[in-house]
Image (cartoon, grey):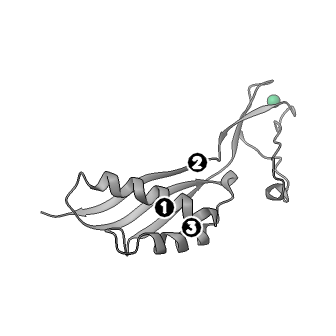
């Protein structure tokens, strides 16, 4: 399950970061997951629960924010959502996205995120 390795990498990074603080409790962990990553929120939450067991993160709430796919067109300069996504888009192993305005080649500028945004922690007084 891909979600488990993604989450355990994130949790490792968070735990390393938390070593700098005197943490009593972590209430919330906010992460951003791009729509192009095809990571399932339920699988992520499930993996989070398992991976955080026995750590200071155990019992904290995982809040998943999704990042919509956005593109920048090399031809006309369009920058914004990729509106021409087909409904079966995620079945393609190599997604091909074209500019919604002119059909030109695009760079993907959003939708591939997979990162921790912030944490809500309680520090020991
Ligand atoms: Zn264009």
Q: Mark 3 = which residue?
A: 44
Q: Mark 2 and mark 1: span between their CA atoms? A: 16 Å
**Mark 3 and 2 residues: CB-CB less than 8 Å, in contact?**
no
Q: Position of residue 77 (x, y in %)?
A: 74, 25
Disc 2 vs disc 1: which is toward the camera? 1
Above or below, 81 relative to 33:
above
Query: Which residue occupies the foreground of this view, 85 or 9?
Result: 9
Q: Position of residue 47 (x, y in %)?
A: 53, 70
Please tell me which residue is depicted at 37% across the width and 73% down the height of the picture. Answer: 58
Mark 3 sits near ligand 1, with its Cβ under 8 Å away: no
Label 3: which secondary element: helix
Query: Disc 3 or 2, which lies upstream in sequence?
Result: 3
Left or right, 33 with respect to 106, comes to: left
Dot 2 and dot 1 residues touching (CB under 8 Å): no
Residue 53 as seen in the image, left or right of residue 124 = right
Name the front one of labels 3 and 1: 1
Question: Mark 3, residues whose alpha carbon is within 10 Å: few (<14), some, or many (≥20)?
Answer: many
Residue named by callout 2 = 113
Q: Which residue is mark 1?
A: 8
78 lies left or right of 87:
left
Query: Toward which corner of the image does residue 75 lie, by quadrant?
Result: top right
Q: Residue at x 65, y 47 (%)?
A: 111
How crowded is the residue under tag 2: few (<14 C-alpha within 10 Å), some, or many (20+)?
some
């Amino acid at each position: 399950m891909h979600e488990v390795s993604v989450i355990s990498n994130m949790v490792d990074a968070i735990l390393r970061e938390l070593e700098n603080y005197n943490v009593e409790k972590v209430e919330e962990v906010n992460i951003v997951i791009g729509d192009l990553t095809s990571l399932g929120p339920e699988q992520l939450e499930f993996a989070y629960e398992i991976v955080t067991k026995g750590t200071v993160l155990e019992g904290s709430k995982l809040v998943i924010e999704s990042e919509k796919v956005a593109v920048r067109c090399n031809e006309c300069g369009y920058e914004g959502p990729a509106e021409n996504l087909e409904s079966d888009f995620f079945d393609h192993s190599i997604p091909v996205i074209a500019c919604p305005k002119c059909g030109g080649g695009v760079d993907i500028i959003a939708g591939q995120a997979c990162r921790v945004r912030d944490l809500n922690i309680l520090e020991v007084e």
